[in-house]
Image (spheres, grey):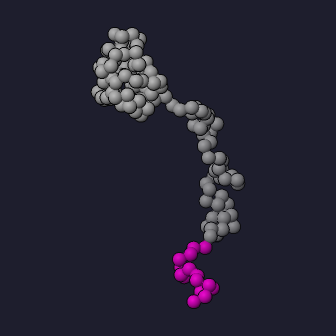
């Protein structure tokens, strides 16, 4: 077998359409493009994304940032450094923090963040913990409970 033997099977390849070569050729005059109009002209059609002059979708959408998250979960956030003033083995909840004046507003469930240092062991009950906050609370001898 040689390279010149590797040819398509007879009948598997169709000859290309010869457009605009007279009425007897089958694709004469308009060449199968219908009568007039933008898509019948030479040079093809419009560019991708063109919407006939209407402001296209890629220009209607915001350019930077991200779309806002609908029904975003809001948390009352407290850093572990603020808990250092509490007594040892205190049970820390959102209600106890509001009573102690550490948290000023109830913006939703409590989330502990890891900024600051803590040395007293505390029993913290919150909806969410960052990895740093959990590590610092447990290193001080306290416990983290997700409610």
Residue 70 appears in the figure: no
Q: Which residue is found at the position 30% from the left and 18% from the top?
A: 90
Name the image quarter holding residue 98.
top left
* Above-or-below relation of 74 to 60: above
Quadrant including the C terminus: top left
- Residue 98, compared with residue 19, is above or below; it is above
Count of numbered labels shown in the rendering: 0
Above or below, 131 relative to 35: above
**Residue 99: percent from left, percent from top:** 34, 10
Predominant secondary structure, magenta span: loop
Rendered image quadrant of residue 14: bottom right
**Percent coordinates x, y for residue 87 in the rendering:** 34, 16
Towards the viewer: 59 or 76: 76
Q: Residue at x 42, y 24 (%)?
A: 118
Q: Is residue 5 visible?
A: yes
Magenta region? 1-15
Residue 78 on the magenta segment: no
Q: Position of residue 47 (x, y in %)?
A: 65, 47
Relative to 55, 125 lies left or right: left
Comparing 122 with 93, the one in front is 122
The residue shown at (70%, 53%) is 43
Residue 1 image point, x, y percent: 57, 89
Locate residue 133: give its quadrant.
top left
Residue at image location 58% in from the left, 83% down from the top: 6
**Quick check: 14 left or right of 126?**
right
């Amino acid at each position: 077998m040689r390279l010149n033997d590797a040819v398509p099977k007879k009948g598997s390849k169709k000859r290309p359409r010869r457009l605009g070569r007279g009425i007897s050729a089958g694709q004469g005059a308009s060449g199968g493009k219908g009568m007039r109009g933008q898509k019948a002209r030479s040079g093809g059609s419009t560019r991708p994304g063109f919407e006939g002059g209407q402001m296209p979708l890629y220009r209607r959408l915001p350019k930077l940032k991200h779309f806002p998250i609908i029904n975003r979960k809001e948390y009352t956030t407290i850093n572990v450094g603020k808990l250092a003033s509490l007594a040892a083995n205190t049970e820390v909840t959102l209600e106890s923090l509001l009573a102690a004046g550490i948290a000023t507003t109830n913006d939703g469930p409590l989330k502990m963040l890891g900024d600051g240092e803590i040395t007293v062991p505390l029993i913290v009950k919150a909806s969410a913990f960052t990895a740093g906050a959990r590590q610092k609370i447990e290193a001080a001898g306290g416990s983290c409970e997700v409610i």
